[in-house]
Amino acid sequence: MNRKAEGRKMSESNRVGFLKKSKKYAKGKEYITEEGTIKIINRYLENGEIMISYMLMDTGDIFYKTELAVNDMLYRYSKKAQELAREVVVPQEYKTTSEDFKALTAKYEAIIDKQQEIINILMEQLKRG
C-alpha cells in the first residue's frame, strides 16, 4: 500500500452528516430575486437537509429555507429576467416601418449622388489646373 494513501484520512466533507463548502451559497453572497436583493447568512444541515438562512436586504427580514427552495427561487428569477430581456420595449418614435427605411435610404442615396457630383467637378477643376 502506498505511504501517502496510508496517511490520508477521510475528509469531513465526504462523511455522512457533514456539509461540503459551497461557493454559490457562501456567507455574504448577494443575489437579486423577485422579492428583492438577498444576502446569504448561513448554510447548515438540519435533520439531514441542507438549509440556508438569508436576509432580504430591502426589509432586513431573515428567512430560513431549504437549499433546494433557494436554488429554485434564483432559477425562476433568472429565467424571468431572460424573458424580460428578450421583450425589450422600443418607444414608438424609434420604431420604423419598411416605408420609413426606404424613404431614408432614398434620401441618403440622393445625398451620396450629390456628393459624387461635387467630387467629379472638383476633380475636373484639378485636372485643368
Image (tube, helix red, strand yellow):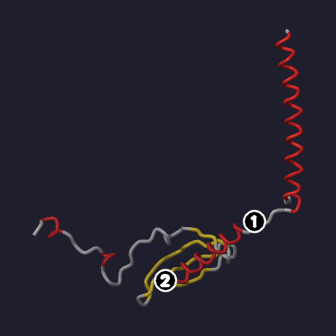
Mark 1 and mark 2: span between their CA atoms? 37 Å
x then y, percent, for residue 67: 50, 81
Where is residue 117, by image quadrant?
A: top right
Question: Residue lying furthest top in this view?
Answer: 129
The residue shown at (28%, 73%) is 11
Nearest to the eye among marks 1 and 2: give it: 1
Where is residue 46, by image quadrant?
A: bottom left
Q: Residues within 10 Å of mark 1 (few under 14, many from 20)?
A: few
| Horizontal arrangement in the rendering, residue 46 relative to residue 80 (left or right) | left
Q: In the image, is residue 21 above or below residue 114? A: below
Amino acid type assigned to the residue bearing label 1 in the image: Val
- Say which element carries label 2: strand
Location of mark 1 (residue): 88
Q: Residue 51 carries which label?
A: 2
- Say which element carries label 1: loop
Q: In the image, is residue 68 above or below residue 105? A: below
x then y, percent, for residue 72: 56, 80
